[in-house]
Amino acid sequence: MNEIILNIYLIINNGLVGEFRVVSYEMEGGDDRKIDFLKSHAKEDYPRAIIFDSPSDENGKFMSYAKFHKLEKRGMHFQLFEEIFQRYGTPENPLICVTPVVDGEIYSQ
């Protein structure tokens, strides 16, 4: 059965998460295979990724990467991607690969 999986990029400039970018795929197979696939395509997917707004506070200031990392450690970062999940119609517990792009440099394995 095919599943929608996502490569999500955190665009971080000067320590702030300024936007998200996304590329989606529809694949079948095991989770390990899908994660390996997403990781292996992270660099080549980036130029064609679709841009999404990242969260900002009431003053329009973007979230720091340190704050994002705290949410990620608690498994709460998925809440930040709800708009993305809705747009792509992902399952309840989507399979994603999150890749930071820090000051223009892609940090992928």
Image (spheres, rainbow, N blue to C red):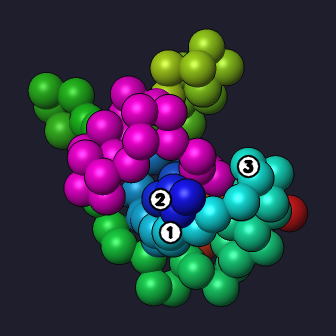
> Which amino acid is tagged 2?
Ile
Camera sees residue 36 = yes
Residue at the extreme right of the image, as rendered: 109
Q: Dividing the picture into quarters, in which one does residue 92 lie?
A: top left
Instruction: Look at mark 2 in the image and give the residue it sits on.
Output: 4
> Which amino acid is tagged 1?
Glu
Q: Dividing the picture into quarters, in which one does residue 62 lie?
A: top left
The image shows residue 75, relative to residue 29, as above or below, that is above
* Residue 46 in magenta stretch: no
The stretch of residues the image draws in magenta is 78-98
Camera sees residue 12 = no
| 87 horizontally vs 33: left or right | left
Rounded to the nearest angstrom, the CA distance separating label 2 from label 1 is 4 Å
**Which comes sooner in the sequence, label 1 or label 3?**
1
**Which comes sooner in the sequence, label 2 or label 1?**
2
Q: Dividing the picture into quarters, in which one does residue 39 lie?
A: bottom right
Is there a contact, CB below 8 Å, between mark 2 and mark 1? yes
Measured as percent of width and height from the top left, residue 103 is found at: 59, 64
Residue at the extreme front of the image, as rendered: 1
The residue lying toward the viewer, choosing from 67 and 32, is: 32
Residue at x-position 51% and y-position 71% = 25
The residue lying toward the viewer, choosing from 25 and 54, is: 25
> Which amino acid is tagged 3?
Asp
Label of residue 26 in the image? 1
Residue at x-position 82% and y-position 51% = 32
| 84 horizontally vs 3: left or right | left
Rounded to the nearest angstrom, the CA distance separating label 3 from label 2 is 12 Å
Instruction: Look at mark 3 in the image and give the residue it sits on.
Output: 31
Residue at the extreme left of the image, as rendered: 58
Q: How many marks?
A: 3
Measured as percent of width and height from the top left, residue 7 is found at: 56, 62
Rounded to the nearest angstrom, the CA distance separating label 1 from label 3 is 13 Å
